[in-house]
Structures are given as structure tokens and as C-alpha cells.
Amino acid sequence: MEKSRKPRTQREKYGEELRLRRTAAKLTQEGLGEQVVCSPTLISHFEAGRRLPKPDDAERIDRALGTDGFFARWLVDLESTYFEGFAAVAELEQQATLIQQFALSLVPGVLQTPDYAREVFRAYRANHTPEELDREVVIRTTRARILDKPMAPAMWTLLDEAVLRRQVGGPQAMAEQLHKIADMAENGRLRLHVLPFGTGAHALQQSLLTLMNFADSAPVAYVEGLLTGHLMDDPALVSASQTAYALALSDAMSQQESLDLVRAAAEEHAHGQQ
């Protein structure tokens, strides 16, 4: 297969099927939009995989195209538990052969313990119930199962030292979290490096970054901020992100030095020495 082809999410496959069925029905985007009661621009977003139709829209699409509930049924399988900016990333993680992540201030979600994740969710919710927090924690910890698959992706984790020092969830929860990361590194489940404070400025100090490689398609990069995320497949942007990761990695401590620092930070948290 062409290595330059970008990986396709289920949303994009849904959109491509919609485009094919619309074309076969000899309808333009404008024509389908009139029957679905939406703009042709929104139909374009559906076909590109950028947006998913609402259930009522999917039912109207099926009526317009005579597809007997096909798009409404498929839509149920595509409903994501993740926010709009991350849903495609969660899909692509399942296909990746290599995931390289950098975390600036928090442990990456896929590595978080339940207690750590609960405190993260609690911190940015002005109002919450225990049930809501429990649901978010289950979603986050379930995502970590990609690392237990027989064909699990290779995982590289680069952490700013700030991740180790900020106490999240109390001293014991933080110690447990850091020991988990160190255990995974020692067991060969991830490659671990830390960028110490002494490094000063580094190439990734402005953003969280995740890079993903695939067996039969081009790599992608993902950056995230408050309430937003941006998945990039433009070759120039992905290449620039890979270069930034390589530069930051070159400034990091070795794996053994990083393990020693993570273990020491865990013990400091556990004994109230932070």
C-alpha cells in the first residue's frame, strides 16, 4: 500500500460511503442537503469525516438515499465517549504501530491510574457528581487496554519533570502513579525519558504532543490544549512535529536515569518530601 496515504478513521469511511451512495443516487450535496434539511456545507463535512450527522439527520439521509436505515445503524457504532477533538485520535491509537507522546504537566491519559485520573477530572469540573467522575475514569482507563493487545503499539513516553513534581490526587496516589510508569518501563511496555528542569528551554515546552506511525499509511501528529485538540496529517506539519520531538528527546535523560528520577520522585511523594 501507499505509505503516503493517511490513516482512515471509521468516521471517514462513513463519510466516503455517504458520498458514494449520494453519487449513485445522482444527488448533489445541495440536493441531499435540501432533503436532510441542512446546508450543503454540512453534507460536505459529513462526507469528509469531519462531522457526524445527528440521529435525526442520519434517518433523513437514509430516507433520501433509500438505504433502509444503513446510515442510522452505523452511526450508533460511531458514537464516541470522547470529546469531538479527540474521538478520531482514540480510533487511530487502535491502528498505530508506534506511539510517541510528550507530556508537559500531566501524566498522559493512557497511562493514568484511576485515582490520578479521577483527580484530573475533578479539577476542571466546577460541579460534579461521584457517578460522573466514575464514568470518566472508566472511559479513560478502558482506553489503556490498547497496551494489552497482542499487537500493542510500541510506546515512547517523554515527560517534562513538572509531571513528576505536581502532586495530583494526594501523596499516595501520586506515588502509585509514578511507580506504575516506572514498572511499565522496566517491563518493556514503554520507553521512558524525562526532560529535567535543568534542561531549560526545549523544543516541546509549549504543548502536549502525540505522534503515531502506522503499518500501511502516513504518520500523524496530535496536539491538545484546553477544551480543544488538533489532529494533523499534513506532511510538513507532521515532519516539523517529529523534528521537535527528536530535539526534545536529545535533551532528555537516559532511560535508566529517568527511571531513577521517577522512582525517587515517587518515594518523595509517598513520604511527604515534595
Image (cartoon, rainbow, N blue to C red):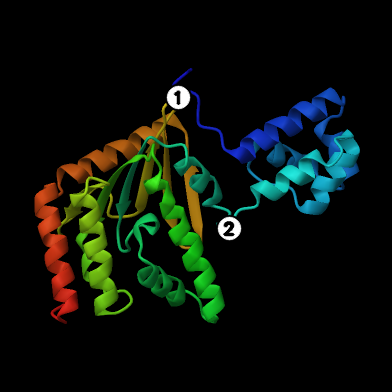
Which amino acid type corresponds to the residue marked 2 in the rendered image?
A: Thr
- In the rendered image, the vertical position of residue 90 relative to residue 213, given as above or below: below
Which residue is pictured at 43% across the width and 76% down the height? 123
Q: Which residue is mark 2?
A: 81
In this rendering, position of residue 22 left or right of residue 106: right
Q: CA distance from mark 2 to mark 1?
A: 27 Å
Instruction: Please state which amino acid type lies under the numbered disc 1.
Output: Asp
Q: Is residue 148 above or below residue 24?
A: below
Closer-to-camera residue (108/114): 114
What is the x, y in percent for residue 100? 32, 43
Residue at 55% x, 50% y: name it.
Answer: 87
Q: Please identify the quarter of the rendering in which residue 25 is found.
A: top right
- Residue 5 percent coordinates (x, y): 50, 24
Q: Secondary structure at mark 1?
A: loop
Q: Quadrant of residue 213?
A: top left
- Pick the residue in front: 22 or 138: 138
Q: Which residue is mark 1?
A: 216
Q: Say which residue appears at 51% left-offset and 52% top-offset.
A: 86
**Residue 119, image x, y percentages:** 39, 75
Q: Are marks 2 and 1 in contact (CB under 8 Å)?
A: no
Quarter of the image for residue 8 reads top right
